[in-house]
Amino acid sequence: MDTSEERLPSRMLIGRDRLFYSGLLGNAMKTRRLGAIAVYVAPDSHLEVRTGGGAWQTRRIVAVPAYTPHQLRTPSGTIATVCIEPESIDARAAAEFVAHVNDGPQDARLVRRVLAARREVTASRDAGGFSTAQFDLCFLRRTLKPRAIDGRVRHVLDLLVDELPENAIPAAACAAAVGLSTSRFLHLFKESTGIPFRSQRMWRRARRFMDRANGEDSLTDVALDLGYPDSSHFSHSIRASYGLKPRSIREGSRGMRVCLGENYVPAGDHA
């Protein structure tokens, strides 16, 4: 076992529809439910994963589909994670990618690629400014076919990424912004993305916390900046997604360097 993998400092790359995290895993017994396809790689010998309350599996790499409840643990308590927003890639390509990671004969090659990319971005003084294609080539050695999205839905997706605290706006306001009734908008959103609007909105807000995970500001201020009505709603949402309290995530992120992708403006930098 190459224990040097375990000693690398924490890093995060966060873009509009891709995210990479390398660092502490947190409480393995808490269920997490990410709104992204999560590819987990053990930086040491192996990982153990359990999805949907099933049996624990021992693997070196695993891909968990978006919105799938799961638990995860590693001997070192560290993990390398590649997250892919499901609405950004073709549905068939997403299913084939997950199957390839979990069942394909080249999973050992992908493990080596992800861990090599982990070392590269950790050694880089500034790994930011990356595009989606550059991210995929760096971590996966391939690009993933994008999903065809209705232009009106694309407009709302961009709002969820770009506008804070506007990502807390109700479906009715989003529907009005693109000239649709609420019911038609909700149907079109699910049809185009494969994800219910409410689930997508909740995940995008929780994902935005990663912008501030290594910060020093008050978590109450962070909650309000992200559009949560209060700290209780904020804490519940973060725990539902990551299986950890916001304070625990912040404590585990001290000293972590965050690098931003192309056209990604972090929470707190919006006018």
Image (spheres, rainbow, N blue to C red):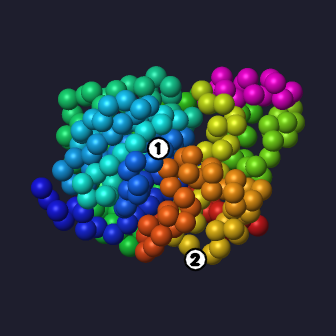
Which dot marks residue 183? Answer: none
Residue 150 vertical placement versus 110 (above, below): above
Task: Please indicate whether residue 247 sits to the left or right of residue 100 in the image.
Answer: right
Residue 128 vertical placement versus 102 (above, below): below
Q: Does the image show residue 162?
A: no
Q: Does the image show residue 76?
A: yes
Name the residue tied to disc 2.
216
Magenta region, residue range:
180-193
Task: Please indicate whether residue 64 sits to the left or right of residue 74 in the image.
Answer: right
The prevailing secondary structure element of the residues shown in magenta is helix
The furthest residue to the left = 1
Point out residue 139 in the picture as x, y percentages from the top left corner. 34, 48
Label 2 is placed on what type of residue?
A: Glu
Quadrant of the frame with the C terminus: bottom right
Which sits in the foreground, 175 or 3? 3
Q: What element carries label 2?
A: loop
Q: Which residue is rendered at x = 80% and y = 46% of the image? A: 169
Q: Which residue is rendered at x = 70% and y = 37% of the image? A: 198
